[in-house]
């Protein structure tokens, strides 16, 4: 989820067929929920990718092609100025406090070193909230690995849907996601930033197995790598995963009352492990089935 906000704040034409064929195949996990007249595909995304693998093919592409509607967690505002206004509204400290004045001295030194090493003055983001600074730090780390939002599944799905005139819906919207971060208690925001700063130098060690698990559809492996830190912080896990998954499971249950085929794409962590959307649907008596990868 933090990566989705990051991908949006950072910001494609399709590659030629020959280039597509040369890229390694990926088989991210896909599920389906059905009743008599409604089909909802549940696709777990990895919000930022390096564009080196081909995931939009086989069963994922077939499911998307069969759908009449795309639904995402949130969609980037069409006008860049609208996003800037949202950031100014929620990410800037309303009391005028500086970030440097709010951080413990040790964290302040590490944070400023990280910003300095990215080629920017340490005061660049001093007017922003700690949660926003954590996203900036994550950007610095993931950009070194070549992971960017423009190669992520959401960008590909949106571009394809727009080209087809397919309706695009949102479960939350970008403003709701920014509000969620902005409502984090001060201590939790600072803890969030501390985690981001401490993970900068080991980002490849964490991101590589996470990306490998996503690419192969290994949901158990993804849970081990992706959700462990959040589950060690119950309040953060509840905010970013459990509470939202409950709302999304209700959305799926309600959507089944209307006919049609929907392609629902959310962060892969929401479709894996305990309190996953599928588990919560099962508790409502709604079955979901894993779509087998095509050979």
Image (cartoon, rainbow, N blue to C red):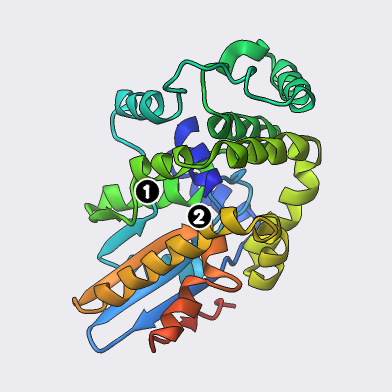
Observer-nearest of 278 and 44: 278
**Mark toward the start of the polypeptide (2 vs 1):** 1
Q: Residues within 10 Å of mark 1 (few under 14, many from 20)?
A: many
Point out which mark residue 8 bears. Answer: none
Observer-nearest of 128 and 29: 128
Tell me the residue at 69%/57% (across/down). Answer: 210
Q: Hey, which quadrant is residue 33 in on the image?
A: bottom left
Tell me the residue at 52%/27% (across/down). Answer: 129
The residue indicated by pointer 1 is 74
Of marks 2 and 1, the one in the foreground: 2
Which x, y percent locates residue 160? 35, 51
Which x, y percent locates residue 191? 66, 40
Observer-nearest of 181 and 18: 181
Q: For the C terminus, give its image quadrant.
A: bottom right
Q: How many labels sit on residues?
A: 2
Tell me the residue at 63%/70% (across/down). Answer: 219
Q: Is residue 235 above or below residue 129?
A: below
- Residue 219 vs residue 105: left or right? left
Residue 62 seen in this snapshot: no
The residue indicated by pointer 2 is 239
Per the image, label 2 sits on a secondary structure element best described as helix
């Amino acid at each position: 989820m933090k990566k989705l906000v990051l991908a949006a704040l950072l910001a494609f034409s399709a590659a030629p067929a020959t280039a597509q064929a040369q890229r390694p195949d990926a088989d991210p996990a896909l599920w389906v929920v059905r009743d008599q007249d409604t089909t909802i595909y549940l696709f777990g995304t990895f919000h930022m990718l390096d564009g080196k693998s081909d995931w939009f093919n086989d069963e994922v592409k077939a499911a998307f092609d069969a759908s009449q509607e795309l639904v995402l967690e949130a969609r980037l505002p069409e006008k860049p100025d609208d996003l800037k206004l949202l950031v100014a509204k929620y990410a800037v400290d309303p009391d005028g406090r500086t970030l440097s004045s709010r951080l413990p001295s040790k964290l302040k030194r590490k944070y400023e070193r990280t910003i300095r090493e990215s080629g920017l003055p340490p005061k660049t983001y001093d007017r922003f909230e700690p949660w926003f600074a954590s996203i900036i730090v994550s950007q610095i780390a993931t950009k070194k690995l070549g992971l960017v939002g423009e190669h992520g599944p959401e960008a590909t799905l949106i571009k394809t849907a727009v080209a087809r005139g397919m309706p695009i819906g949102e479960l939350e919207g970008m403003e709701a996601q920014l509000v969620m971060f902005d409502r984090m208690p001060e201590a939790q925001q600072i803890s969030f930033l501390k985690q981001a700063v401490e993970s900068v130098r080991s980002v490849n060690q964490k991101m590589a197995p996470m990306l490998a698990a996503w690419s192969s559809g290994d949901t158990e492996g993804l849970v081990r790598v992706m959700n462990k830190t959040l589950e060690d912080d119950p309040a953060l896990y509840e905010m970013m995963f459990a509470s939202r998954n409950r709302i999304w499971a209700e959305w799926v249950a309600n959507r089944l009352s209307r006919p049609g085929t929907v392609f629902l794409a959310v962060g892969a962590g929401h479709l894996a492990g305990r309190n996953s959307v599928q588990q919560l649907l099962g508790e409502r008596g709604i079955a979901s089935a894993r779509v087998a990868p095509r050979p």
